[in-house]
């Protein structure tokens, strides 16, 4: 993702990316199970103090190749606090020349002032949570913005010189295939650089999942959801967007470099409530409770639970699982350099998904999902994480 000469350590040991979590939201969408805080905007300034305190405790200032600020709703921060966030990032994680810096935004909280400020700070990319251009689908998902606000948000970003990624969700209650087709066409009409298209999941404990269990909403049937996934996989590449990861499409050269760190199973810093980090081979996750995070960070105490170290076969399985999300799959040279194991040695145990033509080995030794395997990626993942590298 970046010139190795700019960094001294191995990319799976020394982080070259940083994720910062901004948890504040105006309200909780029905499908959301992220670490968020609603109705606590008065604590935004204190939260930024806590972010800097956490950074000061765990690192010394060092350059990175990517920033990613997610949430929550980072664009909900008022302009002065966005500027403060930029100061923190530039002090502790100076971005290398040509680096990628992304901030997530919702249409209703993104304007020209904030977009221009992002450019001044050093951001060059914005990921806009559109989800749908249908008011019916937006209402079903409890999204707070109106359908027409999405196009305006994209224009605002473009006017400020920011690259644009659009998030879409398919399978919303009441959505049918023609409506999803219209969402794709309206998204492409805005000429984004990148599109993420996710199937709706009913996460346990969310309001939408509770409504589903009580019969108040009916999920889209499996056949329709399958057809929706197939439609976007067919249509976006035909319109110039390469399908480079299960849920992600981009114009050539506009892939998300930050998310590529995750799919390569490389190291990254993570700051903020609920943020994960993967440093020195150990993964840890911060507390998801805002009050706890503020108390711990501002007192100089660790904000994360004890970490988990992945080694040996377990680490190799996780690397393969993540690599398989990419359209190019797992490269044998890259995989062995990363894990110390040959990619070929991971194939015993995967006969079931290979025989079912969900997973394929191409002549150069690359292992990747087949087109049908993309539909059943969770099934393949289950086999990889439990069985790869051994015979049954």
Image (cartoon, helix red, strand yellow):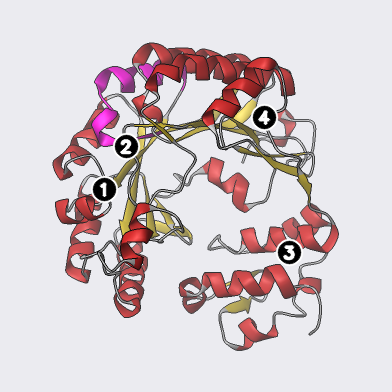
Label 1: few (<14), some or many (≥20) within 10 Å?
Answer: some
Could you tell me if the residues under marks 4 and 2 are in contact, i.e. CB atoms within 8 Å? no
Could you tell me if the residues under marks 3 and 4 are in contact, i.e. CB atoms within 8 Å? no
Label 3: few (<14), some or many (≥20) within 10 Å?
Answer: many
Q: Going 69% across and 63% down the picture, which residue do you hit? A: 320
Nearest the camera: 392 or 94? 392
Give coordinates of residue 16: x percent, y percent.
Answer: 66, 34
Give coordinates of residue 362: x percent, y percent.
Answer: 64, 75
Instruction: Spot the residue most to the front.
Output: 214
Residue for badge 3:
317
If the image is split into quadrants, where does the N terminus sit?
A: top right
Residue for badge 1:
142
Dot 3 or dot 2, earlier in sequence: 2
Q: Going 57% across and 29% down the picture, which residue do you hit? A: 272
Could you tell me if the residues under marks 2 and 1 are in contact, i.e. CB atoms within 8 Å? yes
Spatial distance from mark 2 to mark 1, Cα to Cα?
Answer: 9 Å
């Amino acid at each position: 993702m970046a010139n190795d000469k700019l960094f001294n350590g191995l990319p799976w040991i020394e982080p070259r990316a940083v994720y910062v979590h901004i948890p504040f939201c105006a309200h909780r969408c029905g499908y959301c199970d992220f670490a968020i805080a609603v109705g606590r905007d008065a604590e935004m300034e204190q939260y930024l103090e806590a972010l800097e305190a956490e950074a000061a405790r765990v690192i010394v200032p060092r350059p990175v190749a990517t920033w990613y600020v997610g949430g929550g709703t980072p664009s909900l921060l008022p302009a002065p606090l966005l500027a403060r966030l930029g100061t923190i990032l530039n002090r502790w994680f100076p971005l290398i020349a040509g680096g990628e810096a992304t901030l997530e935004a919702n249409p209703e909280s993104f304007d020209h002032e904030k977009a221009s400020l992002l450019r001044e700070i050093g951001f060059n990319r914005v990921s806009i949570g559109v989800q749908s251009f249908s008011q019916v689908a937006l209402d079903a998902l409890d999204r707070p913005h109106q359908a027409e606000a999405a196009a305006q948000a994209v224009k605002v970003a473009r006017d400020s010189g920011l690259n644009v990624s659009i998030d879409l969700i398919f399978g919303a209650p009441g959505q049918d295939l023609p409506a999803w087709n219209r969402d794709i066409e309206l998204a492409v009409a805005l000429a984004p650089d990148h599109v993420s298209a996710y199937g709706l999941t009913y996460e346990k404990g969310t309001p939408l999942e509770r409504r589903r269990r009580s019969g108040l909403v009916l999920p889209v049937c499996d056949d329709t959801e399958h057809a929706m996934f197939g439609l976007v996989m067919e249509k976006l590449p035909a319109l110039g967007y390469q399908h480079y990861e299960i849920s992600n499409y981009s114009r050539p050269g506009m892939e998300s470099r930050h998310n590529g760190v995750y799919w390569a199973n490389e190291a990254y810093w993570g700051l903020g409530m609920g943020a994960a980090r993967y440093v020195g081979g150990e993964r840890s996750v911060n507390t998801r409770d805002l009050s706890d995070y503020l108390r711990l960070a501002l007192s100089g105490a660790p904000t994360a639970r004890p970490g988990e170290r992945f080694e040996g076969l377990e680490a190799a399985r996780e690397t393969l699982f993540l690599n398989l999300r990419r359209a190019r799959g797992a490269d044998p040279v890259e995989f062995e350099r990363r894990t110390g194991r040959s990619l070929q040695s991971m194939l015993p145990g995967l006969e079931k998904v290979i025989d079912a033509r969900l997973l394929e080995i191409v002549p150069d030794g690359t292992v990747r999902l087949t087109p049908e395997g993309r539909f059943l990626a969770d099934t393949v993942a289950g086999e990889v994480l439990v069985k790869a590298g051994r015979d049954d």
